[in-house]
């Protein structure tokens, strides 16, 4: 086998982007052979783009068709674990769009099931393909500049209008989407946060719901996190600021990294700040330092890079861009943030493969209450609350 035959489940915004990517030959080891969607209009569009495609109005038909070796899951969030499990059960490799799911309990169950299968399970964390973030991870994890002291990420350039939220019946509802800016726009940043700096040990948050828009989910968030070594982190995001900011700042014992505007700046200190604090003879002493732009060689391949790594892993055994099981980490941070905001308490995270293990039942119960009181809203003529087209 020199190519992986793949089928896309959900050909809305994300799924149609993947279709075009495969159609244009950006992934030479992947052949798109089938798509599935509950919307006949989306299937008709896919046929217009690639007449040779097999089309199905259910995911199960695609999974059982014999026409695919792998499935790319691009449905709305709640269906990601369910569809991924069904595809694995059908003997297919799986590449799932972000987030891994809405709540960690069923994502953890999916991860446990995936480990029993001999198929590849990957997740579309395409921001890991950005050389800027790869270099930051290399520097932070390398240990040359000491331990993490502080991480601050202001990611407020997700501006959205009310019309954006009105564009789909499922969008920005607890029943249809399961959350707002944390679950829709920020899964990549939450993943990168833990991928670069490691998982925090506790989270406290304020998630303001409908602060800037007429929606029931959060559109303005501040998370405060602590690490086992005493380091701290702050994550601020919203869809209500214009033009907004995207600035990731990481302080280590001997360096500071600032990623903003497509550049990575590094300030390097001559010695460990903790040591200097203890030994400096003058109360106002400061270390001299140098700041320079860090070269981050490599191409930012994004979705194409993840897809090509997925195919190469199956065909040649090379590393994945992101293992599917890793999707639980960033989701654990957002679930913890929701739970903290809803209850007013600090939420501790466990070490290991299920960070929300101690709290996932409590979180799910509160989420189900949110779902039970979720507002019904009119959808556009071409969408529904149960829309599986994946139009994010």
Image (spheres, rainbow, N blue to C red):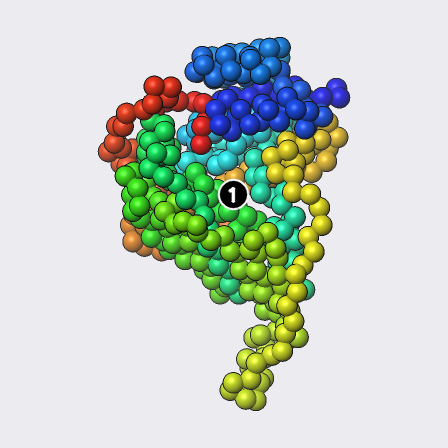
Indicate left or right for 163 with 90 as reference: left
Quarter placement of the N terminus: top right
- Residue 183 appears in which quarter of the rendering? top left
Instruction: Name the secondary structure under disc 1.
Output: helix
Residue at the extreme bottom of the image, as rendered: 281
Quarter placement of the C terminus: top left
Q: Is residue 21 in sight in this rendering?
A: yes
Question: How many dots with numbers?
Answer: 1
Residue at the extreme front of the image, as rendered: 243
Indicate left or right for 227 with 387 as reference: right
* Residue at left offset 45%, top offset 28%: 391
* Residue at left offset 57%, top offset 60%: 258
Position in image of residue 106 (x %, y %): 44, 33
Q: Which residue is mark 1?
A: 188
Q: Is residue 321 in sight in this rendering?
A: no
- Residue 181 appears in which quarter of the rendering? top left
- The residue closer to the viewer here, 61 or 54, is 54
* Residue at left offset 48%, top offset 36%: 99
- The residue closer to the viewer here, 151 or 390, is 390
Q: Residues within 10 Å of mark 1 (few under 14, many from 20)?
A: many
* Residue at left offset 38%, top offset 54%: 222
Position in image of residue 46 (x %, y %): 54, 16
* Image height of 9 relative to 369, above or below: above
Position in image of residue 156 (x %, y %): 43, 50
Position in image of residue 277 (x %, y %): 55, 80
């Amino acid at each position: 086998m020199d190519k992986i035959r793949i089928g896309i489940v959900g050909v809305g915004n994300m799924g149609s982007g993947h279709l075009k990517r495969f159609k244009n030959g950006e992934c030479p080891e992947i052949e798109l052979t089938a798509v599935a969607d509950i919307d006949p209009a989306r299937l008709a569009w896919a046929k217009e783009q690639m007449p040779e495609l097999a089309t199905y109005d259910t995911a199960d038909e695609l999974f059982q068709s014999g026409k695919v070796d792998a499935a790319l899951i691009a449905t709305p969030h709640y269906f990601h674990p369910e569809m991924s499990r069904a595809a694995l059960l059908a003997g297919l490799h799986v590449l799932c769009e972000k987030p891994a799911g809405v709540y960690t309990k069923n994502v953890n169950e999916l991860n446990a099931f995936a480990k029993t299968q001999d198929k590849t399970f990957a997740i579309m964390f395409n921001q890991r393909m950005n050389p800027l973030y790869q270099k930051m991870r290399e520097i932070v994890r390398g240990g040359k500049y000491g331990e993490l002291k502080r991480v601050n990420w202001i990611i407020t350039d997700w501006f959205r209008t009310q019309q954006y939220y009105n564009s789909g019946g499922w969008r920005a509802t607890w029943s249809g989407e399961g959350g707002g800016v944390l679950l829709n726009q920020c899964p990549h940043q939450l993943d990168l946060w833990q991928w670069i700096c490691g998982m925090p040990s506790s989270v406290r948050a304020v998630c303001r719901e409908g602060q800037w828009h007429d929606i029931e989910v959060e559109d303005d968030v501040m998370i405060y996190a602590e690490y086992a070594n005493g380091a701290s982190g702050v994550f601020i995001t919203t869809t209500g600021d214009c033009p907004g900011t995207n600035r990731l700042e990481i302080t280590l014992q001997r360096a500071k990294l600032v990623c903003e505007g497509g550049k990575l700046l590094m300030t390097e200190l001559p010695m460990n700040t903790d040591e200097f604090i203890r030994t400096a003879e003058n109360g106002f002493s400061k270390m001299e330092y140098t700041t320079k732009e860090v070269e981050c060689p490599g191409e930012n391949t994004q979705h194409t890079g993840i897809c090509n790594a997925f195919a190469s892993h199956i065909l040649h055994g090379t590393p994945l861009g992101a293992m599917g099981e890793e999707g639980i980490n960033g989701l654990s941070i957002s679930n913890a943030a929701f739970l903290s905001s809803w209850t007013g308490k600090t939420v501790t995270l466990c070490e290991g493969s299920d960070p929300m293990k101690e709290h996932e039942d409590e979180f799910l119960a509160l989420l189900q209450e949110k779902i039970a009181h979720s507002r019904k809203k009119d959808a556009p003529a071409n969408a529904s609350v149960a829309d599986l087209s994946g139009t994010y």
